[in-house]
Amino acid sequence: MTNLIVKNINIRAVNVPLDKPIIAHLGTFESWPYLCIDVHTNSNSIGRSYIGPYLLSQLGSISKCIEALSKFFLDKNIKPFDFFKEGFKKTALLGYQGVGLYALAALDIAFWDVYAKEANLPLAVLLGSDLKALDTYNSRGLWLIPLDKVEKEVNDLLDNGSFNALKVRIGRDILKEDINVIEKIKKIGGDNITIMSDFNCCYEYDTALKRMLALDDIGLYWFEEPINYRNFEDCAKLSARIKTPINIGENFHGPYDLIRSINANASTYIMPDLMRIGGVSEWLKAANIAEAYNLKFSTHLYPEVSAHLMHLTPTAHWLEWVDWANPILKDTGFKINNGKYHIPNIPGTGIEWNESNIEKYKVNV
Ligand SMILES: [Mg+2]
């Protein structure tokens, strides 16, 4: 691997239709935008990654940032961990969060992928783990859909026993509607179902507290992001008042946000996002910080690469499963049975493209 040299970096933008539209407090989304990265090297191995930075209108700015950063890595030996540190210095004047961090994460994941491919090992194994089955929950639906569609949706998501844990989005206009949805899920799923819930930052402190107190005994496994994600202090006050654990972290932009959150005692659990935490290199740092504070660590989106990293996360908790990127991915053997997620025993992260669908959903940015 000492002679693995970056020769070219290719970026493609796609907008992939969603099988189940996202109906959230932030809006309705019928499709999801991704940037797909290929790192070509002097060997036959190609490093691949995707990021889904939410806003179709910003794919262009992030793509430009990746392109500008790429120039710095051309013709250099791939050393993913060192690359991140060097790249971080290059983007520091742009700010340590946001576009620069997303761009760096996209490259970092692809660099680690090709590094593992060249070692002929799955990324998790390269980093020092055996392959393990991971607890996973189905997060690909149960948005703020009409109540009469909930039953069918729950049955879809349980998928004939593939899953025994689901996430439901709550914070509906009327408390009774939240209660109805949750009771329906419990009735269909039976005693063994685990129900995560997500407010998607829809409340201010006072309304969050009122709704959470009202739902505190209903049997939810966690409340996710009740209030604005930057407000760690109010989240800590909610955590102190509520019995149900609070989970936050998909909006941690780098491990320093995790430290701020820990210092504030903001939540019981955390769930960093692969892109926003800063890719593989920064995830590993966050995982070790979480261990030091005995904080249970779940994932957010990106199940394929996050699953590798959960093998190296000492306090690994739940893997969030969604299939939004599946149309652009080749089936390389990721599997789910009985609520467990398995990564394929192949070199790299297992990310390979379905080229015809990438072509089909390609957008110009
Ligand atoms: Mg969430």
Image: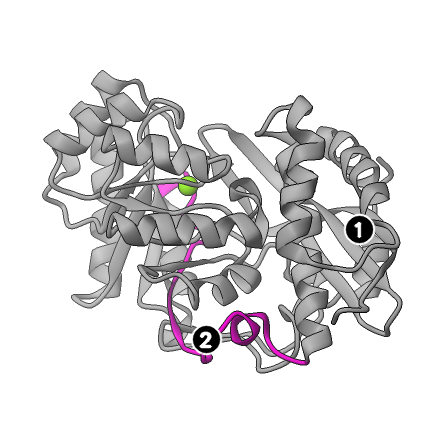
Residue toward you, 55 or 43: 43
- Kindly state the secondary structure of the residue where label 2 is placed: loop
Q: Position of residue 347 (x, y in %)?
A: 66, 77
Q: If the picture is divided into quarters, which one holds ligand 1? A: top left
Give the residue drawn at x 34%, y 57%.
Answer: 166
Residue toward you, 243 or 108: 108
- Residue 105 visible from this viewpoint: no
Query: Where is mark 2, residue-wise?
Result: 129
Quarter of the image for the N terminus: give it. Answer: bottom right
Check the image and report above or below for 12 versus 226: below
Give the residue drawn at x 63%, y 80%.
Answer: 346
Main SS of the magenta part reads: loop
What range is drawn magenta here?
Answer: 120-147
- Kindly state the secondary structure of the residue where label 1 is placed: helix
Please identify the residue farthest to the front as the structure is shown: 2
Quarter of the image for the C terminus: give it. Answer: top right
